[in-house]
Amino acid sequence: MLAFDLVDTYWGIILPQAFAPAMVLILKRFFDQIPVELEDAARVDGANRLRVFWSVVLPLSRPILAAVAIFVLIGAWNNFLWPFIVTTDADLMTLPVGLQTVRSAYGQQYAQNMASAILAALPLVVVFLFFQRQIIKGIATTVSVGSSAVDSGSAYRDNRRHPLKSPSR
């Protein structure tokens, strides 16, 4: 971070948190579930790769992209360790770091700590209320992608039985 001059900057806080490995895996699993036939149909119609992505894949992936963006936002908002490591300036401290700094400077004052924690969580509640539909769609999409792999495995196990043999009782 020192080599890139990102210590005590907003970019030093934002860039490492913008990409979450778990979300990359969720997106990959979702994009693997999009039928290739849709892309092939768009190519037959004369669309290039960018047009296929922009007109076919992106509209299908809006719910999962919204859910991933919200999950990354919530994770970055609640992150304590990285902003604590990369900032020393009090003006750049995020809310969890600022809450801990105030708590350690003035001792345990429970009422003030709880009030400031509620104020820190309030923007996330507002984001959830505004984007509740996208969050639910994204979670449902993620669950359906995960359950399709489980279902295909159970179907494989059921198809291994020999069709002429009767099940033993």
Image (spheres, grey):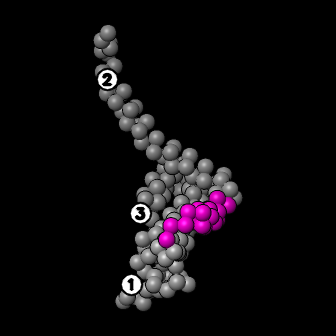
Judged by its main secondary structure, the magenta piece is helix
At 50% from the left and 82% from the top, the residue drawn is 11
Q: Nearer the viewer, residue 1 or 87?
A: 87
Residue 29 in sight: yes
* Eye-nearest disc, 3 or 2: 3
At 49% from the left and 71% from the top, the residue drawn is 107
Q: Earlier in the sequence, mark 3 or mark 2?
A: 3
Q: Secondary structure at mark 2?
A: loop
Q: CA distance from mark 3 to mark 1?
A: 20 Å
- According to the picture, the residue beneath numbered tag 3 turns out to be 21
Reply yes or no: does residue 115 show up in magenta. yes
The crowding category of the residue bearing disc 1, from other C-alpha atoms within 10 Å (few below 14, some 14 to 19, many at least 20), is few
Please state which amino acid type lies under the numbered disc 1.
Met
At 38% from the left and 84% from the top, the residue drawn is 1
Q: Secondary structure at mark 3?
A: helix
* Eye-nearest disc, 3 or 1: 1
**Vertical side of 140 occupied by 93: above or below:** below
* Eye-nearest disc, 1 or 2: 1
**Vertical side of 71 occupied by 95: above or below:** below
Callouts 1 and 2 close, C-beta under 8 Å: no
Callouts 3 and 1 close, C-beta under 8 Å: no
Q: Nearer the viewer, residue 139 or 76?
A: 76
- According to the picture, the residue beneath numbered tag 2 turns out to be 161
Residue interval drawn in magenta: 107-126
Q: In the current view of this chain or complex, which residue is farthest to the right?
A: 130
Please state which amino acid type lies under the numbered disc 3.
Pro
- According to the picture, the residue beneath numbered tag 1 turns out to be 1
